[in-house]
């Protein structure tokens, strides 16, 4: 973790957003963050994102098998969840916006009542002596099929994050790619698109940008995977410039740019150095951030 922080800081990464898992009181994969809080190391900003999704066997060919179901018991569970997270929220390293700890929710559309949920969490934050909590909802757009969630501001979120693979989908390419998947069994392959996809008007201007350096989840999904072909640090830099321009409407500490991801190697989605480009991904990030300094 210390080595990762020492790589991230010079590249301009402001904080790590760690996935956090809470299944109606059951915690899994909690050890890294628990140790970061207990040890005080690394001395590097962080925040948490709740991966509030039912776990299935999709990664080993059994998509209909439920491994761990995500449920929402209600106010008492929310209270227990918030109290569990309070030591993180009050850690001096925790990422804040205007004093409010940042908390990211992966699937806001799966909350039974998102507006009630955000109101309850804001009330608990204020009751705990915080000035509130900066709640961010992910707005996923799977290969341009449209956003999965629309009511960012109406439901009480402070911001959304628009998450969409940079896949070029002109008709000729997509037609050929999908035919190849049908006839040869996949995976689906798309050219890496250096141009930023336009944010749909139904969620603009309530969403922050997210950029992907690369993507290839065939290590997990095999022939059912999706590959972005031709990604490179130079093309990633072009995506970054577009995302930085999108931030012009946000001010102060709300100007957050999300990069997906630091080290999701099983999805071929990472900034860490690799054998192909060395530190090229981090160099691209550092260079573009310097241009906009």
Image (spheres, helix red, strand yellow):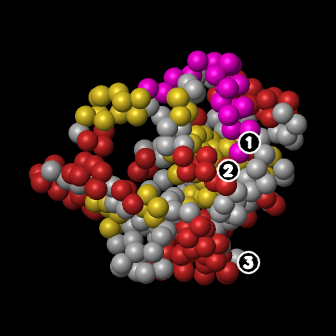
The residue under label 3 is 293
- The range drawn in magenta is 69-88
In the orientation shown, which residue stands out farthest toward the left?
A: 183
Residue toward you, 28 or 281: 28
Q: Position of residue 259 (x, y in %)?
A: 56, 61
Residue toward you, 93 or 122: 93
The residue under label 2 is 37
Q: Is residue 250 left or right of residue 217?
A: right
Q: Residues within 10 Å of mark 2 (few under 14, many from 20)?
A: some
The residues bearing labels 3 and 2 have C-alpha atoms spaced at a distance of: 31 Å
Residue 163 sits above or below residue 148 on the image: below
Q: Residues within 10 Å of mark 3 (few under 14, many from 20)?
A: few
The residue under label 1 is 87
In the orientation shown, which residue stands out farthest toward the front?
A: 39
Label 2 secondary element: helix
Q: Position of residue 207 (x, y in %)?
A: 65, 50
């Amino acid at each position: 973790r210390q080595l990762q922080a020492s790589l991230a800081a010079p590249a301009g990464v402001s904080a790590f957003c760690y996935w956090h898992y809470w299944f109606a009181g059951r915690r899994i994969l909690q050890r890294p963050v628990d140790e970061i809080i207990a040890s005080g190391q690394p001395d590097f900003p962080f925040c948490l994102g709740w991966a509030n999704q039912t776990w299935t066997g999709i990664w080993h060919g059994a998509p209909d098998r439920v491994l761990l179901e995500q449920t929402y018991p209600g106010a008492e569970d929310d209270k227990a969840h918030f109290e569990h997270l309070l030591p993180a929220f009050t850690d001096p390293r925790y990422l804040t916006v205007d004093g409010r700890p940042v908390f990211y929710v992966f699937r806001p559309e799966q909350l039974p009542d998102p507006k009630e949920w955000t109101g309850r969490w804001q009330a608990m934050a204020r009751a705990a002596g915080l000035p509130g909590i900066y709640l961010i909802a992910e707005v996923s757009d799977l290969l341009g099929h449209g956003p999965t969630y629309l009511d960012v501001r109406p439901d009480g979120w402070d911001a959304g994050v628009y998450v969409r693979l940079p896949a070029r989908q002109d008709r000729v390419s997509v037609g050929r790619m999908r035919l190849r998947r049908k006839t040869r069994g996949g995976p689906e392959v798309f050219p890496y698109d250096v141009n930023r996809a336009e944010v749909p008007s139904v969620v603009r201007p309530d969403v922050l940008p997210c950029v992907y350096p690369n993507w290839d989840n065939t290590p997990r999904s095999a022939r059912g995977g999706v590959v972005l072909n031709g990604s490179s640090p130079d093309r990633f830099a072009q995506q970054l410039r577009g995302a930085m321009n999108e931030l012009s409407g946000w001010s102060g500490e709300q100007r957050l740019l999300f990069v997906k991801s630091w080290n999701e190697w099983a999805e071929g989605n990472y900034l860490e150095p690799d054998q192909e480009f060395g530190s090229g991904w981090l160099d691209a990030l550092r260079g573009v951030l310097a241009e906009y300094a």
